[in-house]
Amino acid sequence: MNIKKLLIEAENKGADFSDIRILNSESEKISVKNDDIDSIQKDLNSQYGIRVFHKGGWGFSYGNNENEIGKYFDKALKMAKINSNMLKEKIKLKNFKTYQDKIKTKGESFTNFDIKERIDKLVNLSKKTEHKNLINKQIVTLFLRKEHQYMNNFGADIYQESEHFNFYFKGVGKKDSKIREIFTRKGMCASYDVFKKLDLDRIVHEELERFKTLFIARKAPAGKFPIVLNNSLSEVFFHEAVGHACEADAVLKNASVLKEKIGKKIAPDFLTLSDDPSLKTSHGFFVYDDEGIKAKKTKMIENGVFKNYLQSIETANRMNTELTGNGRAQNAICFPYPRMSNTVLKKRDFSIEELFEGIKKGIYAKESSGGVVEPTNGNFLFGAKEGYLIENGKITKPLLDVSFGGNILTILNKIEKIADDSLMGFPGFCGKRGQIVPVGGMSPHIKISEAMVGGDNGNIE
Amino acid sequence: MEILNNIISEGKKYGDVIVLKKNTNQVSTNFSKKEIKTTTEGNTTQLLIRISKDKKFGYSTTSDFSKWKKCLMDAVNIMKASKKLKHEIVLAKPQKFNTAEMIYSGRLKELPTEKIVEKGYTIIKEMKKEFEIPVLSINKSFEETEIANSEGLFAKEKETSFSTMVEAKSGEISATDFKVSRDLFDPVYVGKEAEKLCLKCLNPKSIQTFRGSLILDYFAFAGFIENVIIPAVSADEIHSKRSPLSNKIGEKVFSENFTVVDDGLMDKGLLSGSFDYEGTPYQKKVIFDKGVFKKPLYDIYSAKKDKTQSTGNCGGLDRIPSIRPTNFIVSPGDYSREEIISDTKKGTLATFAMGYHLINQVTGDCSLGIENSFYIENGELKFPIKQAMVSFNLFEQLKKLEAIGKNLRQETSVVAPIVKFEDVQIIG
């Protein structure tokens, strides 16, 4: 199939811009529950996604059949024409810099090794996973290899390979009548040999140790308190609370509280926040985005001043600004939108201990159990897997199911201190507009002077 | 059919075979005043093959029909490399299937793309000028499924669905409405509903933390059912003791006002059809009868563990077991929405909740945000609330559930009324 010819043909038939994404992927999932195989699956996927821009409207067509690529082009053009016929305002898509490149994965691919190796490894690990409270255990590995081709009629031609792996451990523990759950995950954009070097045994056993505190933990108090967030929770906090509102599609739709904030002071002087897809092996790593644009570090907030939104081709064009290489799609049959990669908060001078100083009653929250945001009004909510009461500057009693809420613009100015530690955060899967993409980040501990805590009783005992 | 026959006859050499083939056609249009309009048409295909023999299984999928031989051999090789399970994997026997009525609409399938885009414009035209519309999407889909196994089972079915989502926004206040149906409906209605809700939410006020009633509107309540109750009644979760309902079959666990049936044969049901992923017929069964936990949702493998029959709730071939609901219907109560509100001394009405994934599924402890919510005092909606969180234990609330609305709605697998919880921590 001569793709270049099809791109030229589409142009001759009226496409102002057209691009094609071809994705061939191979994935494998193994799940072992209580030493037995629970799920085992392999998937071979071929996808073709074609976009056409015609006089202000997008047409997008996709499918799984290589022989029908020509038809997909025709359909995408037809859809774009239906759109533009009804449009009053016919926006033009400006030309942009394109790249030609070939990115190959280094290291070993899981696809070259027998699945039996991984099945045996997981079953053995499961058998070794024991704890007096443990009544149920599940261990899962996911491997994904992608070979992605991107071309457009402006001249882009990029071939990009990538491999991701994820490892999960989930356990249920019981003590007397109390049931508690533990969960941990490791995920990287890296090859099979990196996975093989992971000390899975240690990851699992560190998580099992958490039962100790979980069984004596009490419910979190409700109300407004100062909170200290550890690295991974702080990263999720910035991803949810700030990152989503920086995505330019939300801004253009007037669905972001960060609209018209460029150049304005929205956070304390000591706060600098970036999006950085270039962190090697991170969960949110990529070289070119799904629109063939070279990915780079983008400052969202610098010394408290709001700097940049995260852009796709369409949004940068509408905002008349630079491309940032954040046009991402879950796969070739999904339309690319502005998305984060790795959210990185710059570290500062306080030691972790100094963050607790002066807190009479507060909460120390560790490790994320997920978060959510409504970028339109800036309200967000996120949960911690592990929480502790802070009393007179000291960590005291463990807490259960701590969740926090707040509003972006209010809470940013309540960040009092940023610590001097910085660790790779939680490998996340971020969902937006029905698409899921891998994300990550790096962040130090932070102290927020006041946040809404959703607990069960109004008084701290 | 030919490809299924080929896979079965080739796969039989290695073990028991089950194969599913899906073709999906999806047309959608997404636009708003502030975004370039996108109209999409996609045709996707999927082939799912599972091979099993001597308590071992292998599963493989592909989107490329021309790779069926490789896909089949992948499944065979996985099976060979795999470990033995405790029980044998059994195939469904060939049989006649009942089917739900009105899950396929010819006029919807044939609806031209131009008409769908036009409907989007009509929504915008009919909404008041002062509203912004950050989200407007209309989707139609058509799906054909064929299933066959090496016991001689063969069945197929086709279904359609139509959905519309509109977000109306004024200043910093926004509200969304969403509707799904098996057949065409007038999407203008969805825009109007979003607009109505947004108007009600203008000029919100902050509240102080208090304990009071929490009225959950359809979307908010359906979210709790979907994220907590459905996993809790799935046999898999029960067997692995993650479900708080483990060892509770036949016991009264919730209020006697709480009755739920799971019915895959409900006419017009969004999750209705004739058969599940293993070819077991869809059926109607009582899950909670007046608060008594009657039956978990089973697929063939999980049913075997309990020496019973599959309830037709296999939701995939990737896991052993893999369970999902069909139409999960919470029985209505006696009260109108107005009666539930007017009977509330002090509390809130929540249209949506956010953060379901933060709920502790084992203990039922919930602590999450509410959106498009209103403060209620002395039986009246007083004002919209700026931002609030709620905190309660879902299982304890369902034990004392009294006020249940009399009207049902379905936009997901959950068919539900509105409900009222008492003595909830509401955090402002």
Image: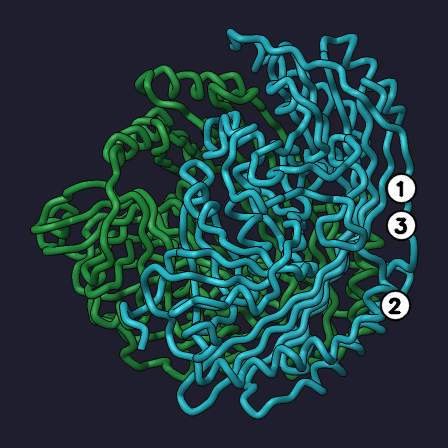
State whether residue B7 appears in this view. no
Q: Which residue is mark 1?
A: A103
Q: Which residue is mark 2?
A: A114
Which of the labelled discs sits on residue A166, or is there none?
none
Nearer to the camera, B150 or B133:
B133
Is residue B238 placed above or below B154 in the rendered structure? below
Give the residue displayed 60% in from the left and 27% down from the top.
B40
Is residue B189 placed above or below B421 in the rendered structure? above
Which quadrant holds residue B92? Answer: bottom right
| Same chain shared by disc 3 and disc 2 | yes
Q: Amino acid at mark 1?
A: Ile
B181 lies left or right of B91: left
State yes or no: discs 3 and 1 in contact (Cβ < 8 Å).
yes
Give the residue displayed 36% in from the left and 15% down from the top.
B125
Which of the labelled discs sits on residue A105, or is there none?
3
Q: Chain of mark 1?
A: A
> Which-is-in-front pick, marks 2 and 1?
1
Nearer to the camera, A235 or B291:
A235
Chain letter for the green part: B
Judging from the image, what secondary structure is the residue with disc 3 in?
loop
A130 lies left or right of B113: right
Which quadrant holds residue A221? Answer: bottom left
